[in-house]
Image: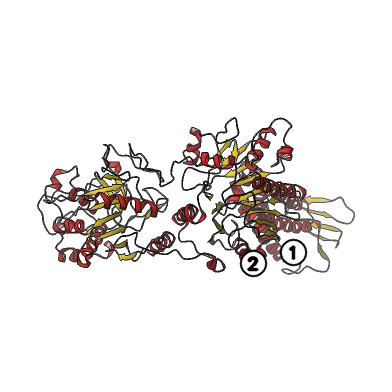
Amino acid sequence: NINIPTLLHSSLVLFQHPPCAKDNTKCSLPLKNCCICGIAACSGHLLAMDKLTTISAGLFMAADVCAIVSLAMPDWIVTSVGGETRLGLMWTCMTLYNRPQVCFTPELQPEWLIALICIFVGCICITTTIILLASSNWDRNVIPYARWVGFTAMVLFCLAAVIFPLGFHVDEIGGQPYHLPHSHQVGISYIMFVLALWITVISELFAEKESMYLTLCLMELIQIGIRSDHNEDASIDITKAWLKRTTPLYHSVDFKYRNTPEKRESEKTSTHWNEERFGDVIRLKQEALQTARSMWADFVFFLDADAFLTNRNTLRSLIDLKLPIVAPMLVSDGLYSNFWCGMTPDYYYQRTDEYKKILNYDQVGQWPVPMVHSAVLVRLTVTQTRQLTFERKNLPAGRYDGPVDDIIIFAMSANYSGIPMYVCNALLYGYIMVPLEAGETVAGKDMEQLTNVLSYAVNEYGALRLQPDMAKFVPDVPKDKLSLTHIYMINLERRFERRAKMVKHFDLLGLDVEHFPAVDGKKLSDKQVQDMGIRFLPGYADPFHKRSFMSDAMVTYPWPCPMTMGEIGCFLSHYNIWERMVRLNQQEVLVLEDDIRFEPFFRRRVYGVLADARRIGGWDLIYFGRKRLQEEDEKWIDGSEYLVKAGYSYWTLGYVITLEGAKKLLREKPLGKLLPVDEYLPIMFDNHPNESWASHFRDRTLSAWSAAPLLLYPTHYTGDEGYVSDTEDSVRIDGTLPTIGVGKGSSGVVSNDTRDAVQAHAAEPKKGDKEQLPNAPGLLTESGIGQGEHDLEAKNRRNEL
């Protein structure tokens, strides 16, 4: 039995189907100042997975015994003609005219021999299945193998049942296939075999049921209870619409709510947590816990509304851990999460070194912690959990002198009961919102945080589809060009999945972006390259693959070519945008690639960067996303806390370029001395380590800056699952494929990877790393990153107590 109480006190919520519901779509909806408490439980006589495994193993054992007994006994076919004769697969016994019984090993006809072999091998398979099911107590990954071996036994037994009657024509019987003479009949051995076959089928069904346990539970046997009060928005209508669609999936639904007043008389704002509000939450959670106990639930799962579970295997994986209290680690747009690694003597959050190691997945597994909240699974079959409580009065007398706070009281009750709490980061389970600070609003900071969380989900799962019944509650975000003249996204037309993901990002962020079809390297031919007059820079060699010319002569069609067709297409894509800017007189343009992830608070930070840049002036290009390759510090632009002077960099994930900057890039006629675009840009702002290459370009006066911290990062790094490169994996001019390995990515038509392996001083970043720049006062102020969100939460929770 699973009991899932849910507490929603977040201002903005992403609702989705429960993890194992029939359709796995997700939908977003706005809620503010919403306090909902719910209970969900598997009711009836549903058994836990370990119990189902035991039943399955017991049935397989019974089938094995029946099959072995049927082989050992000679009573498959019996007759009383001329005495008593009992025919079996391994033994035949005869008693003629009251003489002593004679038993011997028969010479089997082919049909019965095949049946014997099938039953014998089937018994071996069943025995193996029993062993695997027994070992699943330590490793549940063996259960699928047990199911398949059991299925093999079932098939073999079925074959034996079909083939055995074909042998009724033997001389000892004198019948026909599938037809016994009236003087003969089936004996107890055959009945035992049929029983073994029947039990095997039932055992296999139980094994399959064990595999689908949680799916069936969530779809049919969960009882959902929701409590909602003091709403300032359409929370009730939204919940009703969701329940109208999802109620048939569950055993029952209990939804109680009170829509007025919008807030308690003692509350000053929607973010004001006073003792009365904490008391209501504590009461609802305690009722949920007691309900779970009264219905003899095996588990209770507490879920807050600001916890967005996106992994459909969340419950299954947590239950398999067999821990008394465990929480799935949820990530936010900063350092905030749903666990603490340290607690002060006055019961509030304390930063520790272990916290970041767990949060950043530097150590993966299950880790004992003093506090978990927002999404917590409790195994109620553990005796000590009877002492768990959310109410201070239920704690041991004289031991607790802390605040009236549901999560702190619950954590201390676990501590006093000797029950360890764990957080698990073995999977990406989902996301969580950062609590609002006093004075922050739902329409402001909270909406930005929701946008950040949804953006993370889009990065991970692709474009999320809004349920039709939720669409009316989610207004479209107004779109603009971030005060720029235009925004382009470079995308290969055949990469429609990337385009769909980026369009979803633009919808979330409110960006008015034009899709700019990229030049596809796979469609470029040698003749097209020649006709465009493309000539490669003499002496250029790819830093990683070492592709180069056979000589330094600048020829129209060199062998071997130092660039792939994908790299050529990449450069042409950016080049075409620069030409369009000049042709249309576009003053400031943002160029984006299609394999990027947006950093939190993207819009706010872009406006801050552009405001500084325009106020200071004198720039041609600003990187929003890149890979810095120089070790030395990059100098800050005087008068700005958001901009540095760009050094040698790879990648062109996103950059803002002025009309004058585009003219400078075109003025050098780069198609006549081509090299990759992310080598060309550093040359043009005169910060490239290869002076020989740079010497071919005279006007290297491009003024290039960079946002700091960066606003864009690649969705995938080399080696990540799902990494694809449209430059490195394309053919060269000579028709050969480049060597696969750590390569270079620099266009809007590729998944960016890094050439750091060829730079002795630069290491490839891990997925999710933030570029850290020294001497950056105030850089994180606007983004909210590194603000100490747990301390902020503690301060809010102490308010008015």
Residues 667 and 320: in front is 667
| Residue at mark 1 to residue at mark 2: CA–CA distance | 69 Å
Residue 797 is left or right of residue 105, and the answer is left
The secondary structure type at the circle numbered 2 is helix
The relative height of residue 685 versus residue 16 in the rendered view (above or below) is above
Q: Is residue 54 visible?
A: no
Q: Amino acid at mark 2?
A: Lys
Q: Residue at x 57, y 31 (%)?
A: 344
Q: Secondary structure at mark 1?
A: loop
Residue 668 relative to residue 52: left or right: left
Task: Please give the name of the residue rendered at 60% of the width and 57% of the height, measured from the top-left corner.
Answer: 18
Residue at left offset 75%, top offset 59%:
194
Q: Mark 2 highlights which residue?
A: 244
Looking at the rendered structure, which numbered label has been put on residue 171? Answer: 1
Q: Of 617 and 121, which appears nearest the observer? A: 617
Farthest residue, direction right? 98
Q: Earlier in the sequence, mark 1 or mark 2?
A: 1
Q: Position of residue 268 (x, y in %)?
A: 59, 49
The location of residue 446, given as percent across then percent down, is 50, 53
On the image, the x and y values in percent for residue 350 come to: 53, 34
Is 58 on the left-hand or right-hand side of 698?
right
Residue 133 in percent (x, y) is at 66, 46
